[in-house]
Every structure is written in structure tokens, then in C-alpha cells.
Image (spheres, grey):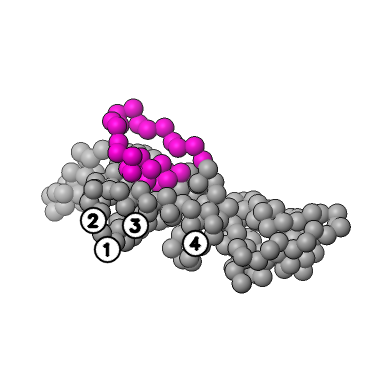
Amino acid sequence: MPVWERPEPRPRAAPVPLSRAVIAAAAIRLADTHGLDGLSVRKLATELGVRPMRLYDYVAGRSELLDLMVDAVYAEIATAAPPESPATAGPQPEWRDTVLAIAHRTRTAALDHEWFVDLLGSRPHLGPHSLAVGEATAAALDRAPGVRDLDDLQRAVGALNAFVAGALRREITERRTTRATGTGEAAWQTALGPYLTRMLDTGRYPTIARLVIDGAHLDAADTFRHNLDTVLDGIA
């Protein structure tokens, strides 16, 4: 029986009260600090001040623990306040406002819990909060003018999910690399900028030169926003 359908164990007269929500919250704290590689049932038990075997009353193993953690993040996505729209944005159709809000809340959650991107697309997300976010997203996309039937809806959901997962993985990977190497964008430009300039000056890469020299250099949030708009334009 999936963890979502199993009843919580009966409360025990113990110094440390437990529940699946308490266990998931502690696991998230560990993963936020140490990543998924630093998360184990034994370390989690130490964090909670209980014996490891006691946790198995609540979760069958690491896989179910990850399911609980993922669904707790989706609970944040479902209940977070929508982000403020850019000052230049005009009125949007209701379906698009909903998708934009969910996508931006997903990005915020991923930046708060970097391990979350490691599980996007790698395992089914079927907890109640995961399903609620998925339902809200699919129901909104179903109202887009370019979505005429179920095949269109499946393609729209797939395209949106692929964009969000790919964009967030790239952004988080860049953050991790910067932390691990101490080399940010400015240091990279200092080290490789002269080489790139020499290569572009050969004239063999005119389109890349236009992108590098004349293109807008957006920060991560603006890049996500602009590219998300492009995806939704295509769906519309």
C-alpha cells in the first residue's frame, strides 16, 4: 500500500513524538544542508533523536522518505503567495496567470531546496500535494486557446514540464558549480573572455557574436520569465 494510503502509526508514549510530517520536515532540513547524498535513515534518526528502527514504523525506506519530502515541497508550491508580476506585464488571460504563478513558485521552491531538481522527472510525483499542483496546471493549460483536445493537452503539459525541469536544473547546476569552484560569471569572463573575443573576431561565428555582443544579458530570474513566456506563447 502506498505511503499516502497507509494510516499513521498510533502515537506512542515516547520522549520524541513522531509523524510523517515531522519526519519529512527533518529530512528536508538535512537535504537542504547536505544534499541528497548526505541524507540517510540513520542520519535522520540522529537528527530526530530516535533509533533508526523507529522511523520504519512510518516509512518503508529511503524511497518513501523521498516521496514524503517531494510532496512537502509541492505543498509549499500549492500554498505560496503568487509572485509579483513585472511592472511591464499587461493583463494576462486567467489560464496563463495560473500557469505563470505555479511555474514561478516552483522555481522559488527549487532555489530553497536545491535537491528538489534532482528528483524532477526522475521518479513519479504522486502524493496528494503533487497531484493538486499537477491538476491545477493541467486544468489551466486545458483552457489555453491552442489546446483543442486531449492530445494537445498532453503535449502542452509535457512541453511545460520539460522546460521547467530543464531550466531549473541548469540554474541550480550553475549555482552549485559556482560554490564548488569559487568561479562565478565575472571570473569566467576574465579567464575566457579574451579567447572568446579572438574566436568571434575571426568572423566564423557571426550569429553567436550577435548573441554575445548585442544580445540582452538577463539574470536568472528574467531568463526564466522570458523563456517561460515563449513556451506559453507556443501553447497559446
Query: Quick check: marks 2 and 4 in contact, CB under 8 Å?
Result: no
* Residue 16 shows in the view: yes
Which residue occupies the foreground of this view, 198 or 19?
19
| Residue 57 % position (x, y) | 74, 67
Q: In the figure, is residue 182 to the left or right of 26?
A: left
Query: Quick check: marks 1 and 3 in contact, CB under 8 Å?
Result: no
- The amino acid type found where label 4 is placed reads His
Secondary structure at badge 2 equals loop
| Residue 126 % position (x, y) | 51, 62
| Quadrant of the snapshot with the N terminus | bottom right
- The amino acid type found where label 2 is placed reads Arg
**Which label sits on residue 151?**
1
Q: Residue at x 23, y 56 (%)?
A: 148
| Residue 205 % position (x, y) | 16, 52
- Furthest-top residue in view? 87
- Label 2 sits on residue: 148
N-terminal-most mark, 1 or 4: 4
Question: What separation in Å lies between label 3 and label 4 (alpha carbons)?
Answer: 14 Å
Mark 3 or 2, which is nearer the eye?
A: 2
- Label 3 sits on residue: 157
Secondary structure at badge 3 equals helix
Query: Quick check: marks 1 and 2 in contact, CB under 8 Å?
Result: no
Give the residues in magenta.
80-105
| Residue 220 % position (x, y) | 38, 42
Question: What separation in Å lies between label 1 and label 3 (alpha carbons)?
Answer: 10 Å
Question: What separation in Å lies between label 1 and label 4 (alpha carbons)?
Answer: 21 Å
Q: Quadrant of residue 52?
A: bottom right
